[in-house]
Image (cartoon, rainbow, N blue to C red):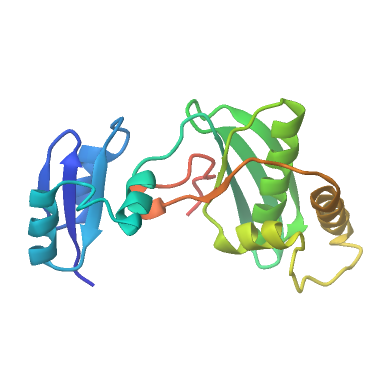
Amino acid sequence: MKKYYVVWQGAKTGIFSSWDECKQYVIGIPGAKYRSFLSKEEAEQAFASGPMMGGTKKNKIVERSMSYIEESICVDAACSGNPGWMEYRGVHTKTREELFRVGPMIGTNNIGEFLAIVHGLAWLQKQNKNWPIYSDSATAIKWVKEKKANTTLARTAETERVWQLIERAEAWLRTHHYTNEIIKWETEQWGEIKADFGRK
């Protein structure tokens, strides 16, 4: 589907016909304001109207998601096979300093993403930090909110270690209160998540 990208604030402003062109003017630019549209006419109207486009609730939400929060944790998992050898880690979004890393062990990518978020929540609580956590896995975010890893992974001697971590993570979610936001990483807008293992 063809999209047009409006940049109101960035290294260069205007209307661009591809994300590859647009992103070089907004990624990593503090205060960048941009959004995609499905038609050139919509894009032209939006560019002329400004980023809030009348200040509707919808566009306030878009405005909020235009750039990520640097004082935060990004988490990611890598898995060779499904199931296969899995590991996960968390990094400081701004500096990419690795804060924790676990594995490899036999598991799945979704399990690794789930464990990474919970590990990040526990790490932040110990550090007394209210940073948000970014994950590019909608499935893992849903599991954390439900406090349950909805996996079909068989429990065997080979997967026992990861199952123990799953049970520990679920127990932590049931017994701890946290105020940290868990936010979906917008890969299309921001590029690969900062904790990415770079194995694609």
Mark yes or no: residue 35 visible: yes
Q: Residue at x 81, y 51 (%)?
A: 169
Depth order, front residue of 80/68: 68
Depth order, front residue of 86/47: 47
Identify the image quadrant of residue 81. Answer: bottom right
Q: Is residue 107 above or below residue 118?
A: below
Q: Position of residue 63 (x, y in %)?
A: 32, 47
Q: Position of residue 11 (x, y in %)?
A: 17, 33
Q: Position of residue 10 (x, y in %)?
A: 20, 36
Number of marks: 0
Q: Position of residue 57 (x, y in %)?
A: 35, 56
Asked if residue 138 lies left or right of residue 103, the reply is: left
Q: Is residue 55 above or below residue 73?
A: below
Depth order, front residue of 18/58: 58
Depth order, front residue of 159/170: 170
Q: Residue at x 61, y 52 (%)?
A: 78
Q: Is residue 89 above or below residue 165?
A: above
Asked if residue 186 lies left or right of residue 168, the reply is: left
Q: Residue at x 52, y 45 (%)?
A: 196
> Where's the N terminus, which quadrant?
bottom left
Asked if residue 120 lies left or right of residue 36, the reply is: right
Mark yes or no: residue 108 visible: no
